[in-house]
Image: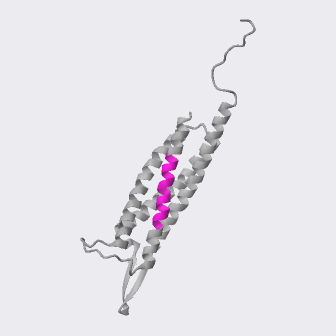
Amino acid sequence: MKGDAPVVLGEPKGYTAQKAGVKRGIAILDFILRLVGFIGTLSSAIMMATTNETLPFFTQFIRFRAEYNDLPTFTFFVVANAAVSAYFLLSLPLSIFNILRSSAKNSRIILIIFDTGMLALLTAGSSAGAAIVYLAHRGNTKANWLAICQQFNSFCERISGSLIGSYVGVTVFIVLILLSASALARR
């Protein structure tokens, strides 16, 4: 019994450093995803807000015009994307803080709560915009709504393209919430 070494239970020496490295990697990925989400939602809001097209009708004095603010749904889409874009920008300092202090718990909890709220807002705006874009492309014969994309090609291309950035933001939020939850679970 004298020659036996004591049995030590616990984590190996390098395990805590490895655990901190994984958390730092998650925090860096969080920062990069927030930048991607900011660019996606900002470009989506700008693209939709600057969308308009005018078509002449019989003469040059009578014209049909299509703008994003003709439909309140598109206005909500722009406001939701702009608000989420501002949130992405304002959350970057907290993300940097998580890179510097990878063991921070409260800042991650705050980010999860606000990320979830912004995910709900962005999903609502994106879904509302997608419904109107669908009607613009397909129309609805039962409601006597005609498809306008046959006449307003440029308008429809831009509003369809603006949905891409918005849904990129939705995907980024889902990944961010899962990353933050996994970082908290590693404690």
Could you tell me how many numbered marks the image carries? 0
Residue at x-position 41% and y-position 55%: 121
Q: Residue furthest bottom?
A: 59
Q: Nearer the viewer, residue 36 or 4?
A: 4
Q: Would residue 97 be visible to someone looking at this image?
A: no
Q: Position of residue 164 (x, y in %)?
A: 48, 64
Q: Taking 56 as reference, is 5 above or below it? A: above
Residue at x-position 44% and y-position 52%: 119
Q: Position of residue 91 (x, y in %)?
A: 54, 51
Q: Taking 107 as reference, is 155 above or below it? A: below
Q: Position of residue 21 (x, y in %)?
A: 66, 39
Q: Position of residue 97 (x, y in %)?
A: 60, 44
Residue at x-position 35% and y-position 72%: 138
Q: Would residue 91 be visible to someone looking at this image?
A: yes
Chain part drawn in magenta: 162-177
Rendered-image quadrant of the C terminus: top right
Q: Nearer the viewer, residue 57 or 75?
A: 57
Display colour scheme:
one colour
Residue at x-position 66% and y-position 36%: 18
Residue 83 belongs to the span the image colors magenta: no
Residue 171 belongs to the span the image colors magenta: yes
Q: Nearer the viewer, residue 139 or 23?
A: 139
Left or right of residue 70, residue 106 in this image: right
From the image, give the main secondary structure of the stretch colored magenta.
Answer: helix
